[in-house]
Image: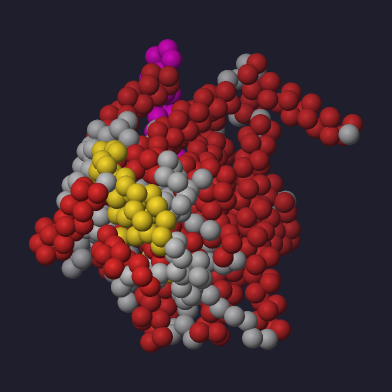
Amino acid sequence: MEKESKILDKALEKMLNIFFSKDKTKLYVILIFILGFILRLINLLNAPTTIDASGHALMAYDFIYSDKLATWNQSVGLWYFLTDLFYKIFGINDIGARFAVLLFGSLSIIVMFLFVKEFFGKKAGLVAAFLLAVSPFHITETIPEMDVTTMFFVLLAMLFFVRALKQNKKLPFILAGAFIGAAVLIKIYSALFIPALLLYAVYYGIKHKPEKKPFRKNILIFIAVASIFCLVPLAYNYLLYQDKGFVDYIFTNILGIGKEKSNEYYSWVVPYEHDYMNFFFPGKNSAIPFFILYFKVIGGADILAILLGIIGLLLILLSKKKDYSILLLCSFFTVYLYMGSMIFLMTKHYIFLLILIIPLASLVVEKITEKVKVKHILAILLVAIFIFQMFWLLHYTDGKFFEKSSMNELVSYKESISENALVVWDSRIFRGIGTYVFMDKHYLEANYFSKLMNSQEQISGSYQPTETYFIECASDDCGWGNVKDQPEFNQSTEQIVDFFKANSELVESIEGTGGLSYSYNIYKGTFQLKQGTLAAADSSHIFWVNPVGYDENIAPIFDDYETHNIWEEAIDKIAHFIFYLSVFIAILSIFIVVYIFIKDNSEKD
């Protein structure tokens, strides 16, 4: 007890030092963190969930109970586990779906400060934290996607790896390996950062000449720790192949294994294709080389970071301090070459590029403060940056950043619907949107409703009054994009709408403002339905090949495997142990970031 009391007293003393120290850098970082958190929270509460993101949020629902190691389309599953954990804390809503991104995206601000400080000092670190906090690109990615969370763990791993090289001690190498391993289990492309870090270690060893024997040993420890986590997707695919003769989508796409058997599951998914020539030169897929094109794409989301980053790149190439430029170069040839050569990859996948560019951008702002001898020049520049970024944020979101989208309004209304109600949604609402909003309810698409009503005699149980909600797409097309080209489909749906209008009460109208924010009308009625009707509606809950919530009462989980011998059982148990270890590390990382930030001594810089 006495020892614990001393630790708490020391921690409290460190915290108080932040507020009363002459050096206010840490206090400013905390304020920047709060600003970044608030901006991301606003996006969480207001911005609609994109089509892809709604699918990922769905796949996280009850992932914990599924006992799965990975999803069929990602090869990994840590983000889904964490998101489901937050579902269980906050509920099946936008907060639960996005809290992992809000939390780790905000903590990335602190890690960015510490990381940039290692290369360019505390002032550049402070600027980098601010640039990340107010980045329109980073803020608007506070949706149920993995990339922001992935890059938190990559950045944390890079921080510990850089510190490990300087200290040449085991613990930071172990932590770097554990955090890059966690990143891999969130998004598998994070493994591309492992060779980038190793190449940087070779450069560091040649330039700084650390003691060879412990240095080599520590590098091997890093490789071993990182590799342990990479075993999970390998084990998952090995056991899946042994049982069913095919592997997940990414392994199928890259290795071509089991295509014949998996074609029924994956044939609808757009394949990954690379054009390495087009990455460097104009080509058939793009008149602009990909490595320039994706800078331009990110510039649409955060033009300031891109422009400052390009200037910063020129500055760092002309300076004597080459360390960060080498790390950037190593990442370019391992991460960006592979990712950037993909044809038509989505903007969200280039969060890693923003993270790598911001340190360069911060260097430019720091240099300006050195050259321009004006009182409070840094504060003036940061205010100017904030004003510009808020203007760009509104521009990037079509002026809707502070408006709550109709999808978020629909999610909020959903929480007032009772557990025993039936929800029928207009088939003109995109299936991903409807399923995301109502995944924890007894729902049914309108095109199944007539069949359900006509089969009441065959459904078990007695008739009973059942609250029934109908969600009308008042915009006529809520996400499909081709309803106007299907007049018969539109007409048949209108007949169902007319039925509910005649037999229900309009209880809510939600106005959309464009984009993914469509308009909805909500009708409520009470119908005499058999007791088994809700279960019959639930039997239609299939999305992206598997049953919603991994409910095997609805349908089999096609990518679940069974073990057939002691060897396979051992692999499965080891893989699950490593996976649960990654969950522990992910949660522990929150406290580690707080600890290293408080412990960090900025005054020595």
Residue 42 placement: quadrant: top left
Residue 366 placement: quadrant: top left
Query: Residue at the location (68% across, 86% down)?
Result: 565
**Quadrant of the frame with the N terminus:** top right
- Give the residues in magenta: 358-377
Residue 604 vs residue 57, the one in the foreground? 57
- Residue 107 is situated, as x and y percent measured from the top left of the image, at 54, 39
Query: Residue at the location (47% across, 50% down)?
Result: 419
Q: Is residue 475 visible?
A: yes
Instruction: In the rendered view, tell whether residue 2 sits above or below residue 349.
Output: above
- Residue 32 is situated, as x and y percent measured from the top left of the image, at 49, 28
Q: Is residue 436 visible?
A: no
- Residue 207 is situated, as x and y percent measured from the top left of the image, at 58, 52
How many marks the image carries: the answer is 0
- Residue 356 is situated, as x and y percent measured from the top left of the image, at 43, 47
Residue 546 vs residue 327, the one in the foreground? 546
| 396 lies left or right of 553 | left
Instruction: In the rendered view, tell whether residue 184 sits above or below residue 5.
Output: below
**Does 270 lie within the magenta span?**
no
Query: Residue at the location (46% across, 65% down)?
Result: 461
Q: Residue furthest front?
A: 462
- Applied colour scheme: secondary structure
**Does 359 lie within the magenta span?**
yes
**Quadrant of the frame with the C terminus:** top right
| 403 lies left or right of 154 | left
Query: Residue at the location (48% across, 75% down)?
Result: 556
Q: Residue furthest right?
A: 2
Residue 442 vs residue 211, the one in the foreground? 442
Magenta segment, prevailing SS (helix, strand or loop): helix
